[in-house]
Image (cartoon, helix red, strand yellow):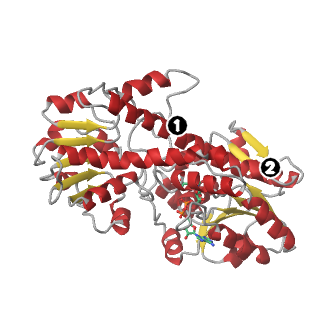
Amino acid sequence: MRWRSVHAQSYSAEPRLTVLGTGYLGITHAACMASLGFEVLGVDTDAAKVEKLSAGVTPIYEPELAELVKAQLDSGRLRFTTSYDKAASFGDVHFICTGTPQLPGGGGADLSQVRSCVTALAPLLDRPSLIVGKSTVPVGTARELARYLAGAGSRAELAWNPEFLREGSAVRDTLAPDRIVAGVTSQRGEDVLRQVYEPLLNAGTPFFVTSLETAELAKAAANAFLATKISFINAMAEVCEAAGGNILELSEILGADPRIGGQSLRAGLGFGGGCLPKDIRGFMSRADELGVQSAVGLLGEVDRINLRRRSRTADLALELAGGELTGATVCVLGAAFKPGSDDVRESPALDVAQILHGLGAQVRVYDPVASANAAAARPELQYPSSLDEAAADATVVLLLTEWPEFTALLPDDLAGLVKQKNIVDARNVLTPTAWLAAGWNYRALGIGTGTPGRPASELERSW
Ligand SMILES: NC(=O)c1ccc[n+]([C@@H]2O[C@H](COP(=O)([O-])OP(=O)(O)OC[C@H]3O[C@@H](n4cnc5c(N)ncnc54)[C@H](O)[C@@H]3O)[C@@H](O)[C@H]2O)c1
């Protein structure tokens, strides 16, 4: 056994793992754990998804993931099922990777998927096992689930091991994480998690053993900090727009201070996706329940700054179009919430496209991988299959997701296609001077008119 643990309390053979919920997090976790040598059973209530995965079709886009899933299926270490009976008899360690979306009409998290994993699994377990939460949950959830297990006389124990992977680099982040957090209630819980993550720990990954509550808070606080940093620089961008400053230069100057650091300090259209927006709202909601709402009150402002960037971007397009968009063709480059993903949940790009549609524009959205998801979410927009088609006859072009094929665009690539040479660079990734010199009306977030600024430096993907 390659990674047999030296700890007396852990399994004498390699534990078998189940992964409950095979979405963006679960598929990645399952395939990566199989690649470390474990036998893994992925479980999902969505039979169509399980059928696809079992046939080697990965239903999401994530770099390196499809190849990894295929290789692990071929190795025989990875399988998928809809059956909790099979999961219970197969697994020693069960990872909860189900969704925790925002409750409709409220800021809190919908915990029904997480709870139903535990209530479905617990009565079926006939030997001591460890249930490990990876989903992002409000602090207190794990303790409530641990109490449920104890009250039901279950032989399963609970641990919480929040996940920090980023879409777009999920496989790399899982196999080489910058830290692993283990919220446990016993030495055995710690030992089993050490056994599971032994190859990563041997490679030097810091391992933090803590309480269930601190583990849950580690994730909430990390997301709150990242969102705050992004909204801080976007707030400075608002000031730059009003005062005639240049946010690119300002963020470079700020980032040179090691106490501040340059990561997540790129101003633009802000954050989106299935995590940061709902997680900061969920954190505020939980803090409210705990009576400490003012401790995280700033997150409300963080959310508002983030959303304001979307309306500001739409305003810039309207301005460039001369104050009227009715009937005008608008080309939107990007639908995914970030490059490297097909995830359109809370996508800033799609929100901007929707605002422009509401202003009467014919909005054509082009994205290299996310068009199908975008079309399902916003069927009223148009989704041509090429960038050229999207740009044809456009009154305004907006760059909203920084895919490499968009950041590499040169003014002449689009000049012969569009009706009017108007571009909004909402991610600050183009070289303003080049577009202005080629006769384009160029607008960006955080750069007042007449202060075009320097070329954007290295692109960063930090959330
Ligand atoms: N996506 C990310 O980048 C990321 C990163 C870190 C943490 N997280 C957290 O991980 C959790 C999952 O996120 P996601 O993006 O993978 O969600 P997702 O919606 O893509 O996946 C959830 C999956 O769970 C399945 N499911 C629902 N109920 C189930 C049940 N009772 N049993 C088995 N399967 C069930 C759904 O069919 C779906 O396939 C969330 O709490 C999220 O905040 C996500």
Report the side of 357 relative to 130 (left or right).
left
Q: Which labelled disc corresponds to residue 229?
A: 1
In which quadrant of this rendering is ligand 1 seen? bottom right
Residue at the (27%, 47%) spot, across then down: 315
Q: Which residue is mark 2?
A: 211
Q: Residue 150's x, y, as percent?
A: 86, 68
Is the residue 460 above or below the residue 451 in the image? below
Q: Secondary structure at mark 2?
A: loop
Q: CA distance from mark 1 to mark 2?
A: 27 Å
Quarter of the rendering containing residue 446:
top left
Q: Residue 347's x, y, as percent?
A: 41, 55
* Frontmost residue, 137 versus 285: 285
Q: Secondary structure at mark 1?
A: helix
Q: Residue 33's x, y, as percent?
A: 64, 55
Residue at the (80%, 58%) spot, across then down: 13
**How many marks overall?**
2
Is the residue 140 above or below the residue 306 in the image? below
Is any part of residue 11 visible from this angle? Answer: yes
Residue at the (84%, 66%) spot, across then down: 128
Dot 2 amino acid type: Ser
